[in-house]
Amino acid sequence: MTTRRAVARLAVSGVVAVVLALSTAGPGSAAPPPPPNPSDSEIDQSRADADAKAARVGELTGRLTAAEARLQELTDDVAAKMEAANKARVDLEAAQAEAAKAAADAASAGVEADAAGKAVEDSRRDLDEFAAASYQQGSTIGSISAYFGAKSPEDLLARAQLLEAVSGSSLNAMDTIERSRTEKANKDAAARAALDVANDKQAAADEAKRNADAAQIIAVRAQQDQAGQAAVLRDDKAAVEAELAQALGAVDGLTAQRAQYDDWAAAKQREDDDNARRAAEAAAAASAPVYSAPVYEDSEPDYSPEPVYAPSGGGGVETAIARAMAYLGTRYSWGGGNYNGPTVGIRDGGVGDSYGDYYSVGFDCSGLMMYAFAGAGVYIPHYSGYQYTSGRQVPLAQAERGDMLFWGPGGGTHVALYLGDGMMIEAPYSGSSVRISPVRYGGIMPYATRLL
């Protein structure tokens, strides 16, 4: 009896051990349902799509760089045409003033010539009347008989005075007036010739101004057309960049799903292995009636996250670059920016005004450089020509990250901050914004300026 009871107790103990073993491996510890597992072809296709989008972005970047370089050329041409039109306007005003003076001189000379001619005619008429009166008195002007016909000494004296007046005064006066009239006529002819020359100059200046104005209109239209093309390319590039971001996100998503599935599969395999082990242990415990199956405790693996490293600092250079990069996308405003950040721009009397730079907050190229280097304790003036000579100049081929690059005579047209690997950050022109772009070598100065 005692033996049967002991065997029964041992059997119950074995059953309890098996039940406990099976309960520890039951549904409560089962792995969750499997997550999505994208196929290799899906991941490869996603990566190929992202690569195609990246190639398209590169193509549009190259086209946009060329388009903006052409836009800069046309913008410079517009400025030159505006100066030519201004010169033509000044020349026309001078020609008009010269023509007006020549017209006034010609009119004055004509009046003098007319007056001289009238004086000659008046003198001639007076002389004729005087001679006729003398003849009626019985004398022949200029003849000795005028003396013989005198009836008294007083008459003789009067006739002598008459002859002297006629010969010594009136005739001589006639010669003088005639010479004066000739001189006045010559002056009149010269004045009219000068007027003709002045009128020709005015006509030529007027034609030059019309041509300059027409050339300016054509240049402005070309610049506006190019600006439109560049804007379309910028929009296309932005759209494809957004598509690229989505494509990269898709790649990351599929890759993350694959990694999640791999983690799940590994966990599931560990669970299956653990269940198999426990089942084996339970079976072994059931076959040994004296002893209860031992219970084993599983421990979670001790995972330590990988350390996260911050990028190493580059001193003042990296400070300057970081400050410039912080304002990517900020609008361009001519004359905008100082040591403290973007500011309202100023009027330029042209393209900048048409974009509203004078009432908009932003940076121009040299203003962005002022702000960037002020963070490193370097304060430079707000003019790229002065910034070009504000530090040590190194050959362009030796340019390093953090150097300034310049364009135009004396560096006075444009400045950008070199980022290395052929890229730069800049505030390009009115209607654009602070951006990163490939270095443009057309018109670039042969030296870079190093401040730090």
Image (tube, rainbow, N blue to C red):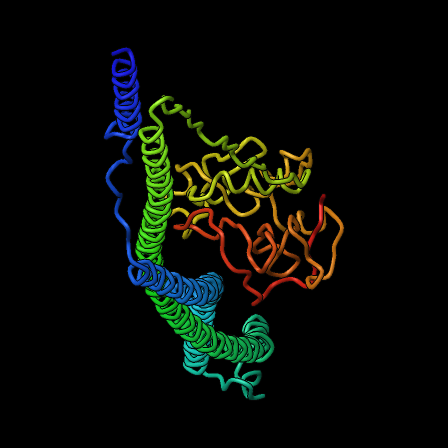
Residue located 47% across and 62% down the image: 72
Using residue 323 as the reference point, say whether residue 376 is left or right of it.
Answer: right
Q: Position of residue 273 (x, y in %)?
A: 37, 41
Residue located 58% across and 80% down the image: 167
Residue located 58% across and 88% down the image: 144
Using residue 344 as the reference point, say whether residue 175 is left or right of it.
Answer: right
Above or below: residue 146 compared with residue 440? below
Is residue 398 visible in the rendered structure shown here? yes
Above or below: residue 76 compared with residue 452? below
Q: Nearer the viewer, residue 209 or 187?
A: 209
Where does the N terminus fall, quadrant-wise?
A: top left
Q: Position of residue 99 (x, y in %)?
A: 45, 68
Is residue 100 visible in the rendered structure shown here? no
Q: Position of residue 84 (x, y in %)?
A: 48, 66
Q: Report which quarter residue 28 is drawn in.
A: top left
Q: Position of residue 49 (x, y in %)?
A: 32, 62
